[in-house]
Each structure stands twice: as C-alpha cells, then as structure tokens.
Amino acid sequence: MNRIDQLFSKKKDHILNVYCTAGFPALHDTRRVMKALQAHGADMIELGIPFSDPLADGPVIQQSSKQALDNGMTLKLLFEQLKDFRDEIHLPVLLMGYLNVVMQYGAEKFVQDCVQTGIDGVILPDLPADEYKTVYEPLFKKHGLHAVFLITPETSEERVRVIDAASSGFLYMVSSSSTTGRNKDISMQENYFKRIHQMQLKNPTLVGFGIRDHESFEQACKYTNGAIIGTAYIQALQSGDDVDMATKKFIERIIT
C-alpha cells in the first residue's frame, strides 16, 4: 500500500503536511529539513521542485525557489539527494512542481525516478485533471505513484467530482483563489469546507494556502482530514535558527 494511503488509514484527522523547497535554505539542506520534519511531528512532507515561474506560489515561496535555483538546485540533483532517503525517512513524501519541469526532464523518467527513490505522490498544479486522465494516468498507475489535484472554493460540484475521480491519495483543497501565503481569515471559508465534506468524496481532503498557526490549523481541520503548511514554515527556516531548532519550534506552535 502507498504510504499516503497507509497514513490516512491510520490517522483520520489533524494530519500535518509540511511543504519545504528542495535545496533551501542551503543546497544540501533537503535531507536535513526532511529529517527535522519527521523528528518533530509532521505527518507528511511535500517537497517543492524549484521553478523560475511558480504560478501558484506567493512571494515567500517564490523567493525560496529562486534561492534554491541560485544555490544550484535541479531536479536531477534532487533525485540524487533523495537516493536511499528511505533508509531514514518513513513519512509519506510528495513532490510538488510544475509540468514544464517534468516535461523537460521526461515524464516517464520522472515517474520512474520518483518510484525508485521512494516518492509516494506528485502535485502538479498546472496539469489539468482531464489531460492527466488521457495522457499520464496509465504511467502513474503502472508505477503506483499518486497524483494529487487541487480544487478551490469556486470549483463547481460537477468539476469537484471529476477532479476527485482523477486524484489519488488525497484531494488538495485550496482555501481561497489566491497564491500561497495570503493572510486571509480561513474561518471565512467554513461553508466551503463544510460543502466539500458533505459531498462524501472518494479521497481524504487536506486544506492548503493560508494555514500559518495553531488557530488556522484547527479551523482547517474542522471539516477535513488535515492541512498543508508552506509559507509559514519557509519563514521559520529563515529565522536564523538552525534547521532542526527552527522546525521544532514551528511544529510545536502549530500542533500545541
């Protein structure tokens, strides 16, 4: 069973998925960050593939992506960094990136390298679910790799069901139609969370965008299985503390 499925079979709520940019803060910090997240209470890790034009990301994650690229980060190097990471990391790990990077790398090689290194799923915000179903799904299913898709408050019920059918592992609920890191009051989205919950979809749901502290985490978890936090964690890594201490303080602030 895929590690994402194993997690959701054992834990039904308050799942904490933390996003970090590969190659940030320093080029070879990727594994160090992942180990710190595992040690201090994250349930899942979402590794961002640095890209020069990350459309869904706000300024903080954009800057971390630029810094990682300036550090020399590439997708090829990321897979090299991840070699044998399963010897020390047991959490589910997803790669989050953009289709252009995958196409340049080669879709089949990308999927094969994901599976060979131990990646459990992929999030590609600019890959339409319909294109995935017709072009990429056989490749992903052949290798047992999950593809996670996004919905927003404006996504129609009909479209939500289409995206839910295409998605595997979980459904990524974007809390608002904006980029990551916007300090919107997530409590204003309760009707949206409730509506999706009442649809009784195939996939578990995690909320992302705007989750930054204990209060917003609890609000996001009220009608979903958990939340995804990215911008606030990137900011924590910029605090000046070492990676382990910054991660410890950050997760404690979210879950307690």
Image: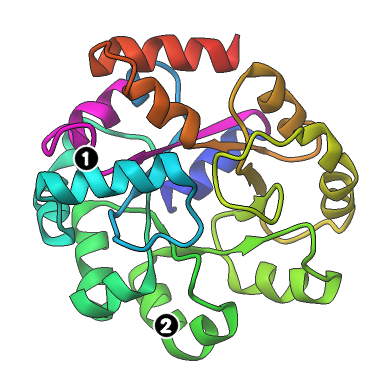
Residue designated by label 2: 136
Q: Quadrant of residue 209?
A: top right
Left or right of 182 in this view: 91? left
Residue 166: tell me if it is visible. yes
Viewport quadrant of the C terminus: top right
Residue 256: image tag: none
Position of residue 101 in the picture relative to residue 128 (left or right) = left
Image side of residue 60 versus residue 80, left or right: right
Q: Which residues are magenta?
A: 13-36
Which residue is more in the foreground, 104 or 157?
104
Q: Nearer the N terminus, badge 1 or badge 2? A: 1
226 shown above or below 5: above
User: Element under label 2?
Assistant: helix
Q: Residue at x 19, y 42 (%)?
A: 23
Image point (78%, 57%), residue name: 153
Could you say which is closer to the camera, residue 22 or residue 72?
72
Q: Which label was assigned to residue 86?
A: 1
The residue at the point 27 percent across, 33 percent down is: 89
- Give the alpha-carbon distance from disc 1 to disc 2, as whole Å: 26 Å
Residue at the (30%, 9%) spot, across then down: 245
Q: Nearer the viewer, mark 1 or mark 2?
A: 2
Q: Secondary structure at mark 1?
A: helix
- The crowding category of the residue bearing disc 2, from other C-alpha atoms within 10 Å (few below 14, some 14 to 19, many at least 20), is some
Q: Position of residue 109 (x, y in %)?
A: 19, 75
Whether 17 is among the magenta residues is yes
Amino acid at dot 1: Arg
